[in-house]
């Protein structure tokens, strides 16, 4: 039996009567420590696990040597030795060590998916040559699922590059048909496709580019009813929407499902790109808690956009998506990339999580999805326009009134560029923004009919006139586009 | 259970360490004057010493500070009146909350600081101590000296949404 001193580490001294050192008798290091725990039972749970063995992080030193390199518990002791108890400090962020983000790793690899064919190796060779990608990275892409909301200006280039990259599954949400006006920028479609449903064409085109990609079409409008179900199976969501209600739906559903939302938006010559991942940074609502009021919304497609611009932004979104899937580089989480295509200048804003965000903060109050009414174009049936009902007139009724003895005054409230595309021959142009100053030009006592492209601006302008005391003011329902469709097809629609 | 007091400068040191090692977890020692059993006020951290994360494996989710390092640190402090009073580590892309693993490898008396860190910023920092009776972590008050005020500004000059 040797007489040995055991040095008690500071944290455990309260359980050893406050002593920094305890004299113990024993023959082995292990035996000594067990004896110590018998003498001071409060030490037991801190030194030993339930199975009676020393807890894994507790290290014993005999004099200056770690007993793991000697005979461990069985290391013999002699008189005058000093045993120290030193913890290894270990910890981690999860009970189980799993990779940070790569959900794709959790999916079991099916035998069929294990190896690439030689054709695939050839197809992806430029990826495989990058150390940051390699076969492992290409497999991650193949296992990945990306949902693109919108197959238009942003979705088209993004879908092309993601299919080219070999993303295993690409979901596409869009319910539009290809329109001639799309072809100025939506490079997924061709002239022969005009009139066909976008998703049908997209599936053909993407699968032709890469047969290894599975394209899943969702030919429906995203709403609070379906958004969670649609997004759920995907690893990354790419927001290519052109309207605020859908943008908020996509953001909210992504936050609620814990998925990254690769955001892009365009306006005239400007673009914005970011990655909203509420688990690691801000969400869209941290920046813009509510959609803008209808009056401030740039009229959908009325402002125009430089065709190449969504190509840039959509490709940047595809870049961020690939980076997220591969787990490489620094994604734009917490950063808003802004650029001006005219100056070709880029700048970045640092974004922070809103500690009081209604959606993604600890004090979040929003637990579900919200359907905001459509602001642009024809209002949803039954929806009140923002300023209350204004009287409207159908194109056919206006045509009839214009042919009568007492035709109304027709005022076009669009911008000069739109007037130049097409206008009603009887109309006079007073852009909506100038209306308050030019109200004197509307002098007639007879009725006034206002029109714009699709009926939104003219409803707002009619509201303004009614509030100013005018009576007999009407807005042309559906705007000049409806007029062109139903009354005068010689007028181009845009 | 003792509250923890730390200076903004030390918090920044730890934050810098966390960002430098991101996406791996960082770890380090917290040094404070040796407290006596009757001390009730906050434990004042006077030094934060970065250490190497020597976990052999997934360092994004695990850290390991070897016992030799702790011993060496304690040896250095012998006779100075200061001791290793706790440890800090970071949670990349994860909240500043101790995990079950953290708890299962903790001892009472030590102050454990956890920093949440992402690729772009250090998030919250919280302090914990193991309740000796229940062997569960309890959060303790972490007060920070000499800071210029809470960071409430989210962004400067956000552009119009479009």
Image: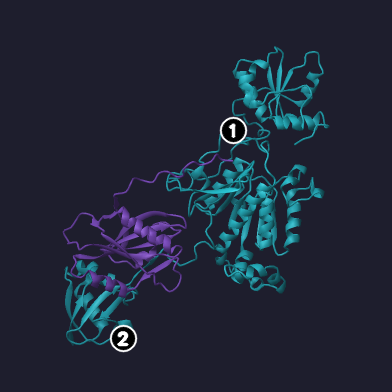
Chain colours: A cyan, B purple
Determine which quarter of the picture holds residue B92: bottom left
Q: Quadrant of the C terminus of chain B?
A: top right
> Which chain contains the residue that carries disc 1?
A
Mark 1 nearby-residue class (10 Å; few <14, some 14–19, many ≥20): some
Q: Residue at x 59, y 70 (%)?
A: A136
x%, y% of residue A37?
A: 23, 75
Q: Which residue is mark 2?
A: A70
Q: Which residue is mark 1?
A: A294
Mark 2 nearby-residue class (10 Å; few <14, some 14–19, many ≥20): few
Determine which quarter of the picture holds residue A452: top right
Q: Nearer the viewer, residue A61 or A182?
A: A182
x%, y% of residue A210?
A: 72, 62
Residue A138 circle label: none
Q: Could you tell which of marks 2 and 1 lies nearer the N-terminus?
A: 2
- Residue A389 seen by the camera: no
Marks 2 and 1 sit apart, C-alpha to C-alpha, by 76 Å
- Say left or right for A461 vs A84: right
Q: Quadrant of the N terminus of chain B?
A: bottom left
Q: Nearer the viewer, residue A433 or B68?
A: A433
Q: Nearer the viewer, residue A147 or A334?
A: A334
> Which chain contains the residue that carries disc 2?
A
In what element is the residue under mark 1?
Answer: helix
x%, y% of residue A211?
A: 73, 63
A293 is higher (above) or lower (below) than A356: above
Determine which quarter of the picture holds residue A493: top right
A406 is higher (above) or lower (below) than B24: above
Same chain under badges 2 and 1? The reply is yes
- Residue A175 seen by the camera: yes
x%, y% of residue B103?
A: 35, 64
In what element is the residue under mark 2?
Answer: loop
Pick out the residue farthest to the front: A343
């Amino acid at each position: 039996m040797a007489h040995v001193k055991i040095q008690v580490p500071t944290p455990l001294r309260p359980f050893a009567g406050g002593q920094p050192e305890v004299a113990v008798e024993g023959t082995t290091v292990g035996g000594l420590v067990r004896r110590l725990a018998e003498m001071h039972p409060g030490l037991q749970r801190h030194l030993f696990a339930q199975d009676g063995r020393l807890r894994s992080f507790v290290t014993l030193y005999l004099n200056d040597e770690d007993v793991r390199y000697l005979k461990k518990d069985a290391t013999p002791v002699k008189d005058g030795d000093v045993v120290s108890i030193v913890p290894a400090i270990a910890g981690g962020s999860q009970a189980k060590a799993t990779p940070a983000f790569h959900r794709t790793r959790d999916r079991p690899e099916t035998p069929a998916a294990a190896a690439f064919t030689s054709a695939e190796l050839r197809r992806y060779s430029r990826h495989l040559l990058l150390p940051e990608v390699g076969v492992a990275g290409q497999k991650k892409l193949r296992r990945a699922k990306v949902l693109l909301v919108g197959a238009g200006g942003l979705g088209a280039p993004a879908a092309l590059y993601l299919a080219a990259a070999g993303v295993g599954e690409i979901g596409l949400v869009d319910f539009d048909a290809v329109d001639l006006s799309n072809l100025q920028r939506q490079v997924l479609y061709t002239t022969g496709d005009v009139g066909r449903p976008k998703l049908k064409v997209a599936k053909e085109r993407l699968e032709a580019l890469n047969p290894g990609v599975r394209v899943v079409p969702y030919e429906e409008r995203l709403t609070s009813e379906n958004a969670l179900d649609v997004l759920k199976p995907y690893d990354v969501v790419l927001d290519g929407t052109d309207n605020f209600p859908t943008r908020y739906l996509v953001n909210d559903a992504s936050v609620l499902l814990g998925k990254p939302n690769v955001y892009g938006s365009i306006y005239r010559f400007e673009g914005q790109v970011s990655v909203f991942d509420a688990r690691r940074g801000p969400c869209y609502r941290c920046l813009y808690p509510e959609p803008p009021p209808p009056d401030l919304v740039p009229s959908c497609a009325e402002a125009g956009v430089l065709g190449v611009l969504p190509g840039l932004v959509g490709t940047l979104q595809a870049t961020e998506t690939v980076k997220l899937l591969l787990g490489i580089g620094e994604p734009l989480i917490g950063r808003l990339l802004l650029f001006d295509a005219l100056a070709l200048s880029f700048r970045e804003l640092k974004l922070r999580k809103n500690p009081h965000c209604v959606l993604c903060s600890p004090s979040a109050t929003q637990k579900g999805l919200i359907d905001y009414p459509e602001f642009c174009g024809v209002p949803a049936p039954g929806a009140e326009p923002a300023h209350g009902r204004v009287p409207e007139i159908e194109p056919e009724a206006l045509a009839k009134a214009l042919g009568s003895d007492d035709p109304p005054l027709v005022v076009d409230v669009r911008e000069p560029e739109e007037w130049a595309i097409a206008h009603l021959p009887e109309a006079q142009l007073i852009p909506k923004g100038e209306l308050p100053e030019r109200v004197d030009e509307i002098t007639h006592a007879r009725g006034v009919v206002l029109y714009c492209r699709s009926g939104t601006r003219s409803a707002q302008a009619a509201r303004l006139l009614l509030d100013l005391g005018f009576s007999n003011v009407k807005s042309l329902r559906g705007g000049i586009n409806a007029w062109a469709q139903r009354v005068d097809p010689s007028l181009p629609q845009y | 259970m003792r509250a923890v007091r730390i200076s903004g400068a030390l918090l920044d040191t730890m934050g810098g360490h966390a960002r430098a090692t991101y996406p791996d977890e960082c770890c380090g020692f917290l040094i404070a004057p040796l407290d006596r059993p009757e001390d009730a006020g906050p434990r004042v951290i006077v030094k934060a010493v970065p250490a190497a994360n020597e976990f052999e494996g997934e360092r994004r989710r695990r850290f390991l500070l070897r016992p030799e390092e702790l011993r060496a640190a304690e040896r250095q402090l012998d006779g100075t009146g200061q001791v290793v009073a706790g440890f800090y580590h970071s949670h990349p892309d994860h909240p500043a909350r101790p995990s079950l693993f953290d708890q299962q490898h903790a001892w009472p008396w030590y102050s454990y600081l956890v920093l949440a860190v992402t690729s772009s910023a250090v998030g919250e920092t919280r302090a914990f101590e193991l309740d000796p009776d229940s062997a569960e972590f309890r959060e303790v008050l972490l007060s920070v000296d000499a800071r210029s005020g809470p960071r409430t500004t989210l962004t400067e000059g956000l552009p119009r949404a479009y």
